[in-house]
Image (cartoon, helix red, strand yellow):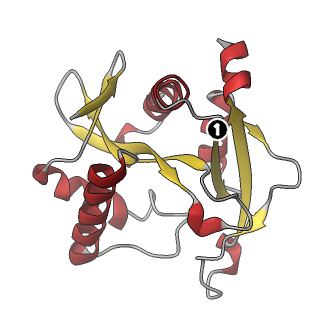
Amino acid sequence: MIITETERLIIRNWRETDRDLAHEINSDEAVMEFFPFRRKRAEADAFFDRVHAMIAETGLGLYVLELRATGEAIGYCGLMRTDHLEPFIPAGTIEIGWRLVARHWGKGLVSEAARALLAHGFETLALDQIVSFAVHNNVRSTAVMERIGMHRVAGGDFDHPSVPDTHPHLKPHVLYRLTAAEWRSAR
């Protein structure tokens, strides 16, 4: 199922053939620099199964980014619930997040996908706001957040409760937000 399309991308649900993509991204040291874990093949397959099931159940989740020109699956970007982050982020809030294979970094593809999914979230899903968050010094992700019109939430920084104490440098997170009204006025 196709969620939306952009000039260079098809944003779609996962296919069985995307298991290799899930493993490549989740085991890559550069891509996972700001995460406390790398997934082995069985763990990446379990991730694939969870994401695929989440989309089937709720319509929300991480969607595959496929290059229109070649059909290559190169990453994922999506809209997900953040209920697991209460009290830092209110239940029911929707987050936008992404990961891209390193060989396609620096081409604006994540920003392109994220803009399309913001439009999907505000126009199709009628969301009031969308948030994003990242480790405080993950400048690649925060730069994307700023490029797509999000702003850092004053007083919104938090220590991510799912990051183990063995990785204290990955606990501090910054929170970004974009409201539907801000999105509409920027268009």
User: Mark 1 belongs to which amino acid?
Assistant: Met
Q: At 58% from the left edge and 34% from the top edge, which residue is drawn?
A: 127
- Please provide percent x and percent y for residue 159: 73, 71
Crowding near pointer 1: few (<14 within 10 Å), some, many (20+)?
A: many
Q: In what element is the residue under mark 1?
A: helix
Q: Which of 128/146 is in front?
A: 128
- Please provide percent x and percent y for residue 73: 23, 40
- Please provide percent x and percent y for residue 116: 46, 25
- Relative to 147, residue 184 above or below: above
Instruction: Determine which residue is flagged by label 1.
Output: 145
Q: At 37% from the left edge and 38% from the top edge, which residue is drawn?
A: 104
User: In the rendered view, does 165 fall on the left or right side of 67?
Assistant: right
Residue that lies at the very extreme toward the right in this rendered image: 155
- Tell me the quarter of the picture where residue 1 sits: top left
Q: At 58% from the left edge and 63% from the top edge, which residue is drawn?
A: 83
Residue that lies at the very extreme toward the left in this rendered image: 17
